[in-house]
Image: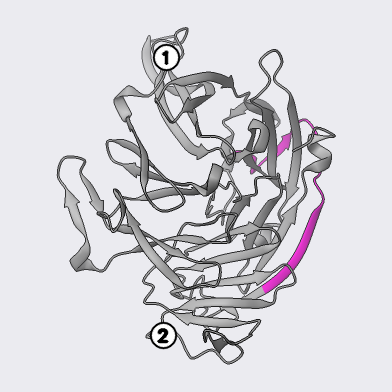
């Protein structure tokens, strides 16, 4: 599947750091292609991202792209839609208790030849989504209240399952922590298709992170537990505070990429008292899933800029956020800037020299009501960009940024 790290980023306001004049190294713009536009609403060819009557509520949508097809989960609309790159609605799975009857899609009938069809399924709040090489779809959904449970040990609410649909959109089974028919997951932060169509579920708990790894048939292979108090720290960096930014699974190996940020205390020199904290460094830890060992680390540089306010220049260092990993161990990171997002690509497979590529993906200010991104395993970065009335599906090709190195 496409390896993806999905980030639903609510950016109605950009970082206050960029409110004033800002100077930085110029990054080459990556060519953007606008593919199609969807209206916001509850009809079959719309996405119910928020209420147009003024009550925006919780904005929830996720998507993934594989081989030119876009799969969108619409939590508010309680449906999942598949579009081609021209914006034609091909398949929809929808809750018939909360959605109107489709006007352009026919119900699926075994044996009949149809090119566009719909299935009914009692979806409640579909969220994170991924598709494997078989075009099998996996999507997070929420259990009804009576199926949820609170775990006093981890202090987490377990209320999520993974629904598995085949390439036609027919329901196959659901997965829980133990695999097929298992107990519900806690909060799901990431969903990935990996090597040999294996499924990876990344969960966040108040006490740490759990990563569940399943084979293509839904059988449990590995469980990795990371406690907040035991996150890795480089040996040369003592007296730092640790924050795990994100975890991504590789699309072509049984490996996890953990991006960990480190902070250190700052002190007022006149009083020698603690005045706050500042970024110290950022490191990606590459973990072998089979034994939980760390294979190596990758230092992530800061995003550096100069902010000019009231005629004074201030140097600013920001952490990049992890977008994901593509084939051949290339790591994508991003940080919001005035023009959109600055992109950094690191070659994690090189041991002697860390190859770096930098670029800019442009997002207009009016498209910042809601952003979500998907990173395909071949390096195509897709975006779901929303304004007050519409949603645009776009993509950026990173081929020129990466160069001639084969993916």
Whether 295 is among the magenta residues is no
**What are the residue bounds of the magenta stretch?**
17-37
Q: Position of residue 93 (x, y in %)?
A: 49, 76
Residue picked out by circle 2: 96
Numbered disc in front, either 2 or 1 = 2
Q: Position of residue 116 (x, y in %)?
A: 63, 82
Note whether residue 309 is visible: no
Find numbered disc 1 in the image and state the secondary structure of the residue it sits on.
strand
Q: Residue at x 62, y 27 (%)?
A: 316
Find out whether the residues at labels 2 and 1 contact each other: C-beta distance under 8 Å: no
Left or right relative to 72: residue 27: right
User: Dot 1, how many residues are within 10 Å of its Cα: few (below 14), some (14-19), or many (20+)?
Assistant: few
The residue singled out by tag 1 in the image is: 267
In the rendered image of this protein, does residue 375 appear above or below residue 232? below
Within-10-Å neighbours for mark 2: few <14, some 14–19, many 20+:
some
Image location of residue 372, percent across then percent down: 58, 55
The front one of 111 and 149 is 111
Judge from the rendering whether residue 234 lies leftward or rightward of residue 159; answer left or right: right
Query: In the rendered structure, which disc, 2 or 1, sits on the residue that comes first in sequence?
Result: 2
Quadrant of residue 344 in the image? top right
Can you see residue 277? yes
Viewer-proximal residue, 52 or 110? 110
Farthest residue, direction left: 152
Expressed as whole percent of the image width and height from the top left, the position of residue 125 reads: 39, 68
Extreme-front residue of the structure: 111
Q: Residue at x 30, y 24 (%)?
A: 229
Nearer the observer, 30 or 290? 290
| Above or below 369: residue 258 | above
Q: Residue at x 36, y 48 (%)?
A: 219
Q: Quadrant of the C terminus?
A: top right
């Amino acid at each position: 599947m496409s390896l993806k790290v999905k980030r639903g980023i609510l950016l109605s306001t950009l970082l206050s750091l960029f409110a004033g004049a800002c100077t930085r190294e110029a990054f080459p713009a990556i060519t953007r292609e606008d593919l199609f536009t969807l209206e916001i609403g509850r009809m079959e060819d719309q996405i119910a991202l928020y209420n147009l009557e003024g009550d925006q509520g919780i904005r929830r949508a996720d998507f993934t792209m594989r081989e030119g097809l876009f799969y969108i989960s619409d939590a508010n609309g309680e449906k999942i839609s598949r579009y081609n790159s021209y914006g034609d609605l091909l398949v929809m799975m929808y809750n018939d208790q909360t959605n109107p009857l489709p006007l352009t899609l026919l119900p699926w009938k075994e044996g009949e030849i149809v090119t566009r069809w719909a299935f009914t399924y009692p979806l409640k709040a579909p969220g994170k989504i991924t598709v494997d090489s078989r075009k099998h779809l996996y999507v997070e959904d929420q259990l009804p209240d009576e199926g949820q449970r609170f775990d006093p040990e981890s202090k987490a609410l377990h209320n999520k399952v993974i629904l598995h649909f085949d390439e036609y959109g027919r329901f196959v089974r659901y997965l829980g922590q133990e695999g097929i028919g298992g107990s519900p997951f806690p909060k799901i932060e990431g969903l990935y298709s990996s090597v040999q169509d294996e499924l990876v579920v990344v969960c966040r708990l108040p006490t740490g992170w759990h990563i569940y790894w399943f084979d293509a048939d839904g059988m449990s292979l590995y469980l990795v537990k990371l406690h907040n108090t035991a996150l890795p720290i480089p040996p040369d960096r003592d007296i730092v505070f640790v924050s795990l930014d994100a975890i991504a699974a590789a699309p072509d190996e049984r490996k996890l990429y953990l991006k960990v940020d480190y902070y250190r205390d700052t002190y007022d020199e006149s009083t020698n008292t603690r005045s706050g904290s500042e970024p110290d460094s950022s490191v990606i830890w590459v973990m072998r899933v089979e034994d939980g060992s760390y294979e190596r680390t990758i230092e992530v540089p800061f995003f550096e800029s100069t902010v000019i306010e009231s005629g004074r220049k201030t140097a600013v260092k920001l952490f990049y956020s992890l977008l994901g990993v593509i084939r051949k161990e290339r790591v994508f990171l991003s940080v919001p800037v005035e023009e959109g997002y600055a992109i950094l690509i690191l070659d994690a497979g090189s041991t002697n020299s860390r190859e770096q590529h930098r670029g800019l993906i442009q997002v207009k200010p009016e498209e910042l009501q809601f952003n979500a991104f998907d990173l395909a395993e071949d390096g195509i970065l897709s975006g779901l960009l929303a304004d007050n009335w519409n949603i645009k599906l776009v993509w950026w090709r990173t081929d020129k940024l990466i160069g001639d190195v084969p993916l």
